Amino acid sequence: QSAGVADRHAALEFSASDNSFILQDFNSPYGTFVNSCQVQNAAVRVSPGDILSFGTAGASFELVVDGAAQVGWGRPGRWV
């Protein structure tokens, strides 16, 4: 939990069909950002090295993927 981050703000999911990650913003009032570009009520593909930020004053996270984990991760996305 962080100031400026909604309870149900966004989800990051792995798509096994095309071996990619999808970030879905749930129309959060405080904003979801990928590399400083706002994503609002949309889903976008994100890649290792992208910087993900949640809320206007929230922390930033770099998407880092371990090759073995990327191939083996088959469960639904993790809520952010």
Image (tube, helix red, strand yellow):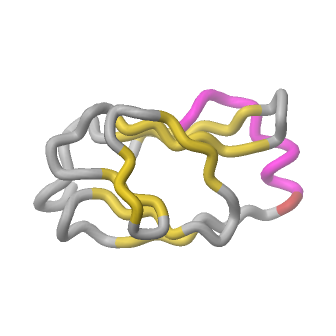
Give the image location of residue 52, x and y in percent: 45, 62
Is residue 67 rendered to the left or right of residue 30? right
Instruction: Pick whichever, 40 or 73, lies toward us.
Output: 40
Instruction: Tell me if residue 41 is in the magenta stretch.
Output: no
x, y (%) of residue 76?
A: 61, 28
- Asked if residue 73 is among those painted magenta in the image, a careful observer would answer yes
> In the depicted view, which residue is nearer to us: 25 or 2?
25
Instruction: Name the side, left or right, on which 38 lies relative to 3.
Output: right
Q: Whole-percent x and y of residue 56?
A: 19, 64
Query: Which span of residues is magenta-colored?
Result: 68-77
Q: In this view, does 38 lie above or below 7?
A: below
Residue 5 location (% of width, % of height): 20, 52
Q: Residue drawn 60% across and 64% down?
A: 63
- Report the residue at 35% width, 55% height from top: 38
Residue at image location 59% in from the left, 37% down from the top:
13
Q: Using the image, determine if residue 4 lies above or below residue 35.
A: above
- For the N terminus, give its image quadrant: bottom left
Note whether 58 is above or below 15 in the view shown.
Answer: below
From this view, report whether residue 46 is shown above or below residue 24.
below
